[in-house]
Amino acid sequence: MLELLAKNHELWVKMVIGMGADKDTANDIVQSMYLRMDKYVKDKKKVVYKDDEVNRFFVYVTLKNMYISHKKSKHLFFEIREDEYQTDELLYTESNEEMEFAFIKFMAKIQEEMKTWHKYDRILSEKYLKSDYSLRDIATGTGISLTSIFHSMRNNKKILRERFKEDWEDFKNGDYNLI
């Protein structure tokens, strides 16, 4: 299972960076996710489909919860640098700009789809995807059962996966003009 997870390492790091973490923190969280999956997930079917495809939503939820826990941690983390003003290097080449534009376009399509959903599903999905709240936090804050929220999110994820499967494949393959 770990070998299959590691094949998508860069994607997992990008997911955590998209949540607001810097690259080093994202790498740390992804490495911790590998350890957590190895330790706690006994049934491989939860993480890997029968054709050896990783359940990305399961990994995303795990990473999001780990990132939220990391942000809420009471420990202070200090980065040791030789140069106080050193910044992370991210080379903005034409392909990176094209990829970023394609990702924004892809997310806009998802947001348009979500506008057509029932208000309950739309609000829950937006609250979860656009904030640092975990499913448990949302359940506590709204008084809605965690099970109900989990099932709604699972159904919403299924809708998005079916509706945007081809666009996601185009994005992964670098066919940005097809999105």
Image: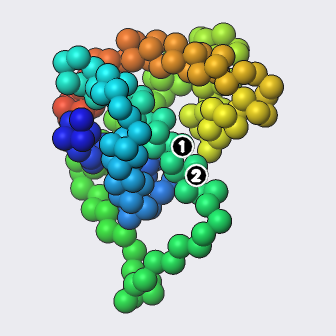
Please identify the quarter of the rendering in which residue 92 is found.
bottom left
The structure residue drawn at horizontal position 38% and vertical position 12%, both measured from the top left corner, is 162
Q: Quadrant of residue 71?
A: bottom right
Q: Amino acid at mark 1?
A: Asn
**Camera-side residue: 137 or 126?**
137
Q: Is residue 125 visible?
A: yes
Percent x, y of residue 119:
70, 14
Q: Percent x, y for residue 67? A: 52, 50
Q: Position of residue 49 (x, y in %)?
A: 27, 20
Residue in front for this viewpoint, 102 or 42? 42
Q: Are marks 1 and 2 in contact (CB under 8 Å)?
A: yes
Q: Is residue 88 above or below residue 104?
A: below
Name the secondary structure under disc 1: helix
Side of 23 relative to 50 (left or right): right
Query: Relative to residue 154, is residue 72 drawn left or right?
Result: right
Amino acid carrying label 2: it is Ser
Q: Badge 2 is on which residue?
A: 69
The residue beneath circle 1 is 65
Mark 1 → mark 2, Cα distance in angstroms: 6 Å
Q: Is residue 156 visible?
A: no
